[in-house]
Image (cartoon, rainbow, N blue to C red):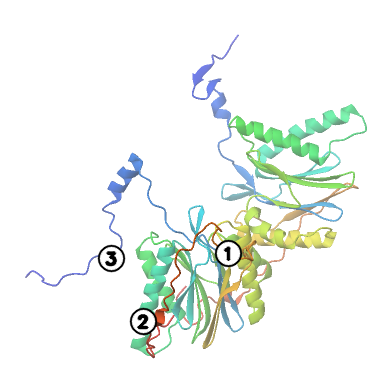
Amino acid sequence: MTFTIPIENGNGVKDAEADSQRTLYPYVTGTSVVAIKYKDGILMASDMGGSYGSTLRYKNIERVKAIGKHSLLGASGEISDFQEILRYLDELILNDNMWADGNSLGPKEVHNYLTRVMYNRRNKFNPLWNTLVLGGVKNGEKYLGMVSMIGVSFEDNHVATGFGNHLARPILRDEWHEDLSFEDGVKLLEKCMRVLLYRDRSAINKLQISKMTEEGLTVYEPYSLKTFWEFSAFTNPTVGAEGSW
Amino acid sequence: MSQSSVDLPPKGGFSFDLCKRNDMLTQKGLKAPSFLKTGTTIVGLIFQDGVILGADTRATEGPIVADKNCEKIHYMAPNIYCCGAGTAADTEAVTDMVSSQLRLHRYQTGRDSRVITALTLLKKHLFSYQGHVSAALVLGGVDISGPHLHTIYPHGSTDTLPFATMGSGSLAAMSVFEAKYKEGLTRDEGIKLVAEAICSGIFNDLGSGSNVDICVITKGHKEYLRNYMEPNPRTYVSSKGYTFTKKTEVLLTKITPLSERVKVVEVAGEAMEE
């Protein structure tokens, strides 16, 4: 019979192998997720890329998934940690369904659960390296919230993760308003995703939009945005000074 | 060979002689003084008749706002202006220096300055200091070969762009430009877009704030709109003004009009240009 001898070290009494299992850096990462509340529910957009450092390794990763009947979860950051979170939530929803009491976990409850999970992992210095966006509609009430890898959590009318914080949030603050129609909401999301495509090096031109309303979830087919590169200063930057740059 | 008696000018660049001593002092616990940075949003764009430059007006010293209304759009030549982000002293000094070099050059050649002249002078200087002169600039102007807009980074690299943003608020301003810029904007559309981009930096970036300055340069004409927009006025201003507390006893009131003691003479033609 083998047993591990607890080793006293700076982090307290712990197994010798435990240290090597903590998350130190992310490996395969997804970039920003942008989400808004609109008239009928929640719209969430993300691109489908998974970067391995500076290589664009995966181009078909769905970073927005449905949770239960009422919620959408989008994640940026480490993809393997996102998959782990999906497993935790699977178990949560399964147990909830087994109660068969006519009630089901709504977005507020799932958001709270995720906040607790993220915060407790961070307290053990072993974070799940993700920023999560949780949105949904239950009983006509729209909900949109965010949890970061250190456990910071809040809810708002529009959220963005990663680079979206700097590039998408100014646009959303200016142009979001209550009761956006579906078309206006998609146009607003596309505006943000286009700026991200231009200015975020880990973004790819293949985005997927998901919609959650009282009726249920719709995930649209991935598509790409039109971009414009024909500014005259791009095509001929050395006007008046041939040979310079 | 005979000894040369000509005194060579001192070698350029920084002298790093005190670095070891400074390192030792910081190890002993001395905190080095922090720089006055401009933590900024500066932008420029090319419209159909020329160039529009914009800047916010907040200068920060760490977490404190040192100057609520500083000027970040610097004069280079009658047809060239330069916005500066980074260490305030560096942007001031480097733009002043190149501005005087340009003026001497104008006297020598008898022609208007070109934007690429300013560009080359700035990038040569910044490169030779290997990034230690922390000045990130947006240089714009209209010369004989048309409107030009360039960005210059502290290490000396440059870009030629139709629209540009620099500073801590550059991402907020760039998101506005990327969403709304198109070629052939009119003057009013351009000013509106620049003001929108600067406001985006002012409200979404903590290092930028206060007012919006704008400079419009067209062929043969420039307009410096200082404090074009003031979106952060004092919220509560007392209507009564300031009065001393009632308990203050006025002992003596004596008013001396200064015009009796001093002679004010107007000297014609010596007003400093800018």
Residue A18 coordinates in the image, percent (x, y): 57, 24
Q: Disc 3 sits on a residue from what chain? A: B
Q: Are marks 2 and 1 in contact (CB under 8 Å)?
A: no
For label 2, the crowd category at 10 Å Cα-Cα, with few meaning under 14, some 14 to 19 and many 20 or more, is: few
Q: Residue at x 65, y 69 (%)?
A: B196
Q: Give the Cα separation between the discs numbered 2 and 1.
A: 38 Å
Q: Residue at x 41, y 53 (%)?
A: B34
Q: Quadrant of residue B94?
A: bottom left
Which residue is under mark 3? Answer: B12
Marker disc for residue B262:
2
Point out the residue furthest to the top here.
A1
Residue A245 coordinates in the image, percent (x, y): 47, 73
Q: Disc 2 sits on a residue from what chain? A: B
Task: Select label 2 or label 1 by which is in front.
Answer: 2
Above or below: residue B75 compared with residue B220: above
Q: Secondary structure at mark 3?
A: loop
Amino acid type, residue under disc 1 in the picture: Ser
Q: How many marks?
A: 3
